[in-house]
Amino acid sequence: MKTELSEKLFAKANTLFPGGVNSPVRAFKGVGGGPRFIARGKGSRLFDVDGNAYLDYVGSWGPLILGHCNPEVMREVQDAMKSGASFGAPSPREIVLAELIRERMPWVEKMRFVSSGTEATTGAIRLARGFTGRDDLVKFDGCFHGAGDSVLVKAGSGVETLGLPDSPGVPADFAKHTLTLPYNDLAAAEALFAARGGTIAAVIVEPVVGNMGVLVPRPGFLEGIHALCRKHGALFIVDEVMTGFRLAMGGACDRLGLRPDLVTFGKVIGGGLPVGAFGGRAEVMDRIAPAGPVYQSGTLSGNPMAMGAGIATLRQLTPASYERLEAASARLAEGLAAAAREAGVPVQVNRVGSMLTVFFSEQPVFDAQSARGCDTKRFSRFFHAMLEAGVYLPPSQFEAAFVSLAHSDEDVEATLDAAKVAFRAALQG
Ligand SMILES: *Cc1c(COP(=O)(O)O)cnc(C)c1O
């Protein structure tokens, strides 16, 4: 596979951007080698600057549930652009998208649009702190909630250990208010709440984890966390930036029967343009400025083109869409597990709906610690063999692959043919 032009551009990009990229995981650091520069996408496929085609299972890291260049999304965005790119004043498309969201999740009584998932979680966390008058936030090891200061913290050795900053630049005085727990461990959460429930403003969680690779919540885990929040007066924030409108018409919350106090969105609700949102109970949301004292703002929030892309995306997602995604994703997951078995490679294929990860592990993977036990060298060889065969997977063991409505049955079968060879390559070390 020819990669000359990508290499040339990456060399130039390295003189302009730290690490040559504008978001870290694009740099292929987790798998080695250099990234491909993408010229265009169409349906289920990406085309790089050297003219190589790939079946794309990254989908811009989640937003492109309809595939690349969906005609109706393009039409809506173009229509919006003709009337002006941004006004800094209310415009009607904000109402259309908000109503589409509230129709699907009626318990999201009020919401605020922002321009990224990071802004959504940052706003929701500030609101929870402002609403409860408490400072501490609980998150789970391995869950990613964007790049805000409060959430760039991982677990210490015990549940009561004060958080340490995961990133230089986050003051320890600030990080100490973020407490981390292992995912899927309700007993640990009960112990933490028993010890200091009165200081906890909120718990934030990925309902199905995508950002440690796919981790599936155990029955009762999320309900148990919500019950603890209720009992101790903390807010329950479900971060649906990745799962929202990907796992079901009503998001992971509907699929799992959750009714949190606050929910965050991003990715799919922007259809590939920069959008995020947070919302929930009106009583809580009305504490946001200008209705209330908790400040949050954004020059481009509710941007008409971004709203248009979200409107066109949600309108095309019907119950039949999710059935189609389920069937294609199940076939892919089963085929991948069978191909690995045939090649003699131990793997765990974790999947919920159209999110899936092949973990190179002999043991079940259900939290950050078990995920960290994976053979990442094997994953890297598998990744590169797939890439060479024209299948573009997330360049990290700890990310979810996404199936879109643009993936045909033939695409899935071609992916499985490539995987048969790639699993054998994964063993060659
Ligand atoms: C992607 C993601 C974010 C951050 O969204 P950005 O738009 O990248 O800022 C937050 N939470 C979850 C669960 C995500 O998957």
Image: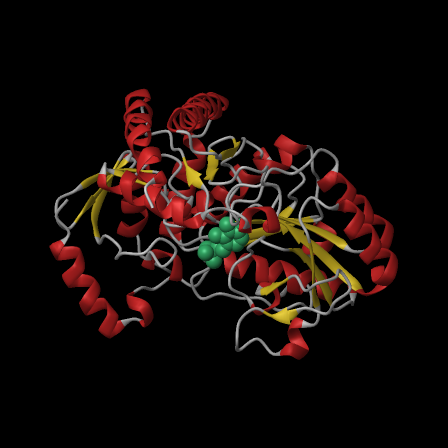
Nearer to the camera, 403 or 28: 28
Q: Position of residue 381 (x, y in %)?
A: 33, 45
Coloured how?
Answer: secondary structure
* Residue at image point 82% right, 51% down: 190
How many numbered marks have been drawn onto this rendered protein structure?
0
Left or right: where does residue 67 sit relative to residue 318? left
Nearer to the camera, 376 or 35: 376
Left or right: where does residue 419 sit relative to residue 349? left
Nearer to the camera, 174 or 310: 174
Q: Position of residue 184 (x, y in %)?
A: 69, 44
Quarter of the image holding residue 24?
bottom left
Residue 209 seen by the camera:
yes
Q: Position of residue 169 (x, y in %)?
A: 53, 78
Identify whether 127 is placed above or below 396. below
* Residue at image point 35% right, 53% down: 31
The N terminus, quarter of image:
top left
Identify whether 68 is placed above or below 173. above
Q: Position of residue 315 (x, y in %)?
A: 43, 32
Quarter of the image holding residue 410?
top left
Left or right: where does residue 181 sit relative to residue 384? right
Identify whether 126 is placed above or below 16. above
Nearer to the camera, 366 or 136: 366
